Image (spheres, helix red, strand yellow):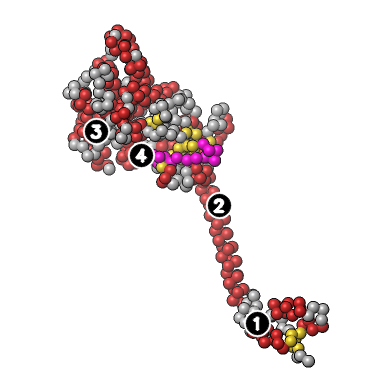
Amino acid sequence: MPRYRRVPAPCQSLRRRYMQEHAGKLQLLMLPRELYDEWHLCANSKNTFPFSSNASASLGLVVLVIVVACTCLIQGRRKLRNMKLAYFRQHGGTILFEEMRSQQGADAFKIFSEEELQQATNRFSEKQVIGRGGHGTVYKGLLKSNVEVAVKRCMTIDEQHKKEFGKEMLILAQINHRNVVKLLGCCLEVEVPMLVYEFVPNGTLFDLIHGNHGWRISLATRLGIAHDSAEALSYLHSGASTPILHGDVKSSNILLDDNHKAKVSDFGASILAPTDESQFVTLVQGTCGYLDPEYMQTCQLTDKSDVYSFGVVLLELLTCKKPFNLDALGQEKSLSMMFMSAMKENRLEVILDDGIKDEDNIEILEEIAELAKHCLEMSGENRPSMKEVAEKLDRLRKVMHHPWVQQNPEEMESLLGEPSAMAHSTIVSDQYFSIEKKAVTNLQSGR
């Protein structure tokens, strides 16, 4: 008769096994000798008890780590939320929100969260970069609504404008002009606000002019682009409900659609630009060659500063040369200086782009050059307004569309307007060159 021993508790698997084999029998808690040795090995194993003292200590440590991690995560999220709220209020988000509620037509303007813009730009991937400038970097983004946008991450913001920033953004959002890129919204819960514009897919005027295909642009197309851009700036200066200075007019801020219709972008950059001289040198490096010499002396932006910068854009269209060339010598570093020198010496044709030099176009080219020269006057008071510039370019376009007018002096004079001091002034001040040279020197030393 087999000998039985009472089953100690630890080896539960053997116990269950024996219960299954001898279900309902009195020997439920007994173990035959042939299984005892197997049980003995199990009972003496280090892993017999699932909750040994070492295991319990390890489990307690794991629980403690999880609790600490969760606490830190909650506190971190709370701190981040409070910081975003502080930035939002600091940039005038509360004022903007109240203005949006009270004003009609502000529904199209949206306050974006940082997370929304991160998702739209693949967390601001370098692959999404479509432009860089003195004020920030522009990324192509895709919103959840499948709307393509251009997201601008600004580099800095004027401390004096922080509280009014949101309100000023709402003013800019109300701009509605066919030649101005629409501002769709902004993000205020970051240290430096981000702006969201409509996306214009066909690149910039800078790329068109200075790319390999720049020579293929006809004079009529160039004149149309110039007129569109001038109309946009004229609207910003005098057509909008609140006069707006662009502050960073340049060919890379003029976008083109598939039909080469121009749209001015990045307007209102003066709101984001520092006004103190300590930050000024850093700022101007991004727009070297376009800056008004008068602005560089006073740091005071005016509508005539935009006129000067637009004059440089006209020179780019006429010459296909970049506004500033560090590798050149003397006056040739600055396109505006080189142009003014050529005009003074009556050798305009030397610097004109070969793609538009034509006997049939020479009178139009001379008119455009004369207009550019007046935009580049040293004193802002002597420059035309953008409205006058747009009107002059419109008249030149009409002449281009009706070549027969060029054969009729009376018709041409009626389209171009009566001769004026602006149209026939040929005096170039020596003071202009001295200030321009000083500006170039200052920019080189600041790079």
Where, by quadrant of the figure, is residue 375 drawn?
A: top left
Q: Which residue is mark 3?
A: 334
Circle 1: element type: helix
Q: Which residue is mark 4?
A: 134
Of circles 4 and 1, the one toward us is 1
Q: Which residue is mark 2?
A: 78
Using a 10 Å C-alpha cutoff, classify the residue at mark 3 as few (fewer than 14 neighbours), some (14 to 19) or many (20 or more). many
Spatial CA distance of label 3 from label 4 is 18 Å
Spatial CA distance of label 2 from label 1 is 51 Å
Using a 10 Å C-alpha cutoff, classify the residue at mark 4 as few (fewer than 14 neighbours), some (14 to 19) or many (20 or more). some
Where, by quadrant of the figure, is residue 415 drawn?
A: top left
Circle 4: element type: loop
Left or right position of 393 against 441: right
Tell me residue 268's x, y (percent).
Answer: 42, 32
Quarter occupied by the C terminus: top left
Please tell me the numbered disc located at residue 8: none
- Give the magenta range: 130-147
Spatial CA distance of label 3 from label 1 is 91 Å
Using a 10 Å C-alpha cutoff, classify the residue at mark 1 as few (fewer than 14 neighbours), some (14 to 19) or many (20 or more). some
Quarter occupied by the N terminus: bottom right
Left or right position of 436 against 102: left
Q: Which residue is mark 1?
A: 42
Amino acid type for the residue under numbered disc 4: Gly
Q: Say if the magenta span includes residue 137.
A: yes
Residue at 39% from the left image edge and 24% from the top image edge? 228
Using a 10 Å C-alpha cutoff, classify the residue at mark 2 as few (fewer than 14 neighbours), some (14 to 19) or many (20 or more). few
Circle 3: element type: loop
Work out which residue is located at the far top of the displayed protein and give it.
410
